[in-house]
Amino acid sequence: MSAPFIAGNWKMNGLGVDLAEAKVLAADLAKQPSGARIALCPPATLIWRMAQALKSSAVEIGGQTCSAEPAGAFTGDVSAAMLVDAGAKLVILGHSERRGGHGETDAQVRAKALTAMAAGLEPIVCIGETLKQREAGDAVAVVRGQISGSVAAQMASGAFAIAYEPVWAIGTGLTPTLEQIEEIHLAVAAALKGVVGDAVARTPILYGGSVKPSNAADILKTPGVGGALVGGASLKAADFLGIIRAV
């Protein structure tokens, strides 16, 4: 497996003034390079400005979603080509906040991933169970189903990542036990191999859900974990660096 992949998801946060935090992050990484691959995924309004501000830095830029359509009469949507044009190299797809709040299905996530890859973006496909599913003992079955529904076999020819984010841990301060994280990550890897074959060996499986400097080291050394998708803690350079330095 390659270097750990640490990606920050700013969600619907961030104005022009907040680019200062991204610049602090990039400057610190320039002084003390990390052994991890680093990315930030700001809101669409900041992608171009952040890409310009961090040009030639160690930080890659990504979007938070894209349309499954390449172009057309889809008011308010953003295409994969538009993200690339703005400076993005990655895109988060199928986040639970998109699945739950916007009704995105596995099939829609898969279609978006294929469109994104065709445009030259690297998708980060999110999966994860709800608290009800976890308590019912269905967590493994749920993520296996999401892998088979959200990942297409043809994605094996390109680069992509998976992010396991238990819905009940996102933004709540709660995290699964390390044993639970390991169980799901190994189950995801097995399911993913069934879809993309040997490409699983170069596909990082990230953990997300209340990742912070205080728990990052333990999570990142858990078997099967190839990095982290970080929400709130990625908004401030100091917090995000605390996670990055835990690698």
Image (cartoon, rainbow, N blue to C red):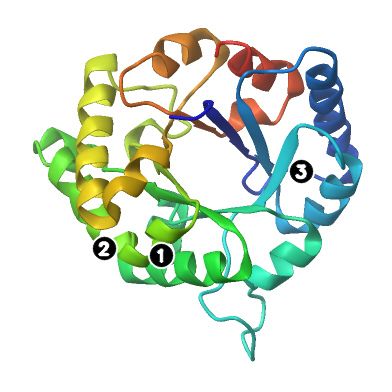
Tell which circle, 1 or 2, labels the residue nearer the N-terminal end: 1
Q: Nearer the viewer, residue 62 or 76?
A: 62
Label 1 secondary element: helix
Locate residue 161 relative to residue 67 in the image: left or right: left
In the figure, 7 relative to 49: above or below?
above
Seen at 49% across and 23% down, the residue is 211
Check contact, mark 1 vs mark 3: CB within 8 A: no
Seen at 52% across and 72% down, the residue is 115
Mark 1 burial class by Cα count in 10 Å: few <14, some 14-19, many 20+? many
Where residue 185 sits, quadrant-wise, is top left
- What is the C-alpha distance between the residues marked 2 and 3? 32 Å
- Counting from the top left corner in percent of width and height, residue 12 is at 65, 49
- Counting from the top left corner in percent of width and height, residue 205 is at 39, 36
Q: Nearer the viewer, residue 106 or 221?
A: 221
Seen at 88% across and 45% down, the residue is 16
Q: Amino acid at mark 2?
A: Gly
In the figure, 214 relative to 148: above or below?
above
Seen at 89% across and 48% down, the residue is 52
The residue carrying mark 1 is 109
Label 3 secondary element: loop
Label 2 secondary element: helix
Which numbered disc covers residue 149? 2
Does residue 172 appear in the picture of this structure? Answer: yes
The residue carrying mark 3 is 14
Mark 3 burial class by Cα count in 10 Å: few <14, some 14-19, many 20+? some
